[in-house]
């Protein structure tokens, strides 16, 4: 999932073969909720992606970030 600069939380549970794009410069997270290994492939598009305040994003998100992710 990721949190926008307006502190809105977007998250989704992915299935095999799904793709999820994290917008540049946003606080983001991944969690394997299955019982087997997961594979993640990442690609970066910028050396200067911008910044976002992590604490404000995580604790001010709407809906709130689940405590198990924190």
Image (spheres, helix red, strand yellow):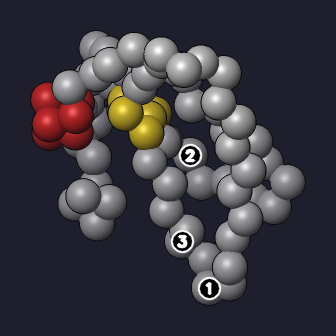
Give the farthest residue toward the bottom.
35
Give the farthest residue toward the front.
47
Q: Earlier in the sequence, mark 3 or mark 2?
A: 2
Instruction: Say if mark 3 contacts mark 2, CB within 8 Å.
Output: no
Between residue 22 and residue 48, name the one nearer to us. Answer: 48
- Looking at the picture, how far across and down is residue 4, in whole percent? 37, 21
- Dividing the picture into quarters, in which one does residue 7 lie? top left
- Dividing the picture into quarters, in which one does residue 70 lie? bottom left
Reading the image, the residue beneath label 2 is 12
Give the CA distance from mark 2 to mark 1: 17 Å
**Image vertical order of residue 24 relative to residue 3, above or below:** above
Residue at 14%, 36% (x, y): give it: 55
Q: How many marks?
A: 3
Reading the image, the residue beneath label 3 is 33
* SS under mark 3: loop
* SS under mark 2: loop
Give the CA distance from mark 3 to mark 2: 11 Å
Between residue 60 and residue 28, name the one nearer to us. Answer: 28
Is residue 16 rendered to the left or right of residue 60?
A: right
Reading the image, the residue beneath label 1 is 35
Residue at 69%, 56% (x, y): give it: 40
Residue at 85%, 54% (x, y): give it: 17
Is residue 48 rendered to the left or right of residue 56?
A: right
Instruction: Say if mark 1 contacts mark 3, CB within 8 Å.
Output: no
- Looking at the picture, how far across and down is residue 10, in whole percent? 45, 33
* SS under mark 1: loop
Between residue 15 and residue 32, name the one nearer to us. Answer: 32
Is residue 64 rendered to the left or right of residue 17?
A: left
């Amino acid at each position: 999932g990721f949190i926008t600069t307006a502190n809105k939380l977007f998250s989704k549970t992915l299935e095999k073969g799904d793709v999820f794009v994290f917008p540049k410069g946003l606080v983001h997270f991944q969690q394997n909720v299955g019982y087997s290994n997961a594979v993640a492939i990442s690609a970066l598009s910028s050396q200067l992606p911008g910044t976002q305040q992590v604490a404000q994003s995580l604790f001010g998100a709407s809906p709130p970030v689940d405590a198990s992710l924190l």
